[in-house]
Image (tube, helix red, strand yellow):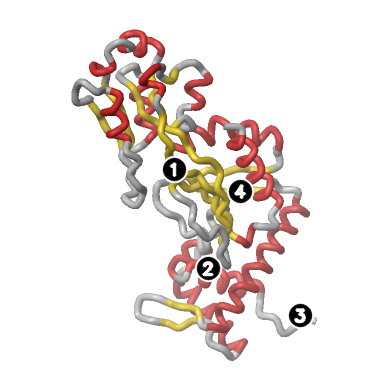
């Protein structure tokens, strides 16, 4: 019945090269040489008597026939992997990519709740600021991003799920508030200047200046929200920061939100989940998505 099918190894090599759009990257993923990848692909093309890739000097591109086979190969290998994991009784693993600040300040502190509810699902977190090509990089299963979700929430290969729109307020240690409650103009303010230049301005500086009406406020900037929070936690000043980011610190009483003028808050941007359609029937991904929506829906 399956005598005419190429070898499973050839399909694995082709699927990796097609997904990563690179023989070199496929070689790194499969721990072989680029030459071995090239030979496997050439042998597969000879077997099928079709061209799967257009080879250029520094790049390879799928042909229409290659695109068709790549989609089928990816789907088949995903199903095969899922079945093998079930038979082995091995834990289902999800690799989640998100920003360093969201990972450190919200996801990691809350992850024990998910693990308690789903002990058979292993969550691996990649904290990074670079934009992951989740359509092709199978090392990452889901991405939690910050900004404005695309207007089109579903494409041919991706699903974008809005999670929460943040609120940004003033937070400091209880002792700092006691010392500066009557003279906010003498306070030091900490803000985050995003590494991503495409994120829109939220008018943070203008909000601080409206609170400190008599003088030019002292504002210090960090490029990571986690550092902004740490500066406030050390008692050095007031962080103008996402309430979601300092949720754990507020629950523990380490930071409190300001009162009076300092109770001012502004609406920030969204956190949203990106799921490749290849995982839309994956039960582990389904459970993690539902948990995120439930946890963040309480805010």
Res 111 visible = yes
Label for residue 94? 4
- Which of the image's four quarters has the N terminus? bottom right
Q: CA distance from mark 4 to mark 2?
A: 18 Å
Which picture quadrant has residue 228? Answer: top left
* Helix, strand or loop at mark 4: strand
Q: CA distance from mark 2 to mark 1?
A: 31 Å
Which picture quadrant has residue 74? Answer: bottom right
Q: CA distance from mark 4 to mark 1?
A: 26 Å
* Helix, strand or loop at mark 2: helix
Label for residue 239? none
Q: Residues within 10 Å of mark 2 (few under 14, many from 20)?
A: some
Q: Earlier in the sequence, mark 4 or mark 2?
A: 2
Q: Residue tagged by mark 2?
A: 19
Contact check, label 3 and label 1, Cβ < 8 Å = no
Q: Residue tagged by mark 3?
A: 2
Question: Relative to 242, is 93 above or below?
Answer: below
- Single out the residue that lies furthest toward the right: 1
């Amino acid at each position: 019945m399956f005598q005419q099918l190429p070898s499973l190894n050839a399909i694995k090599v082709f699927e990796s090269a097609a997904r990563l759009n690179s023989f070199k990257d496929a070689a790194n993923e499969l721990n072989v040489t680029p030459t071995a990848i090239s030979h496997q692909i050439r042998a597969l093309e000879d077997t099928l008597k079709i061209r799967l890739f257009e080879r250029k000097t520094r790049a390879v591109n799928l042909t229409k026939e290659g695109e068709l086979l790549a989609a089928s190969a990816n789907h088949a290998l995903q199903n095969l992997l899922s079945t093998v994991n079930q038979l082995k009784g091995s834990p289902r693993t999800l690799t989640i990519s998100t920003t360093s600040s969201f990972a450190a300040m919200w996801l990691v502190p809350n992850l024990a709740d998910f693990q308690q509810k789903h002990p058979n699902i292993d969550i691996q977190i990649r904290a990074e600021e670079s934009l992951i090509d989740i359509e092709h990089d199978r090392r990452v299963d889901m991405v939690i991003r910050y900004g404005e979700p695309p207007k089109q929430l579903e494409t041919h290969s991706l699903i974008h799920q809005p999670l929460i729109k943040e609120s940004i307020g003033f937070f400091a240690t209880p002792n700092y508030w006691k010392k500066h409650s009557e003279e906010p103009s003498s306070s030091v303010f900490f803000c985050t200047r995003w590494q991503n230049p495409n994120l829109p301005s939220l008018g943070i500086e203008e909000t601080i200046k409206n609170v400190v009406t008599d003088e030019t406020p002292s504002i210090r900037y960090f490029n990571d929200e986690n550092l902004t929070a740490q500066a406030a936690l050390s008692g050095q000043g007031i962080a103008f920061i996402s309430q979601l980011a300092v949720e754990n610190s507020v629950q523990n009483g380490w930071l409190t939100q300001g009162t009076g003028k300092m109770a001012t808050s502004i609406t920030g941007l969204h956190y949203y989940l990106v799921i490749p359609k290849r995982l839309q029937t994956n039960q582990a991904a389904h459970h993690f998505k539902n948990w995120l929506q439930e946890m963040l829906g309480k805010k």
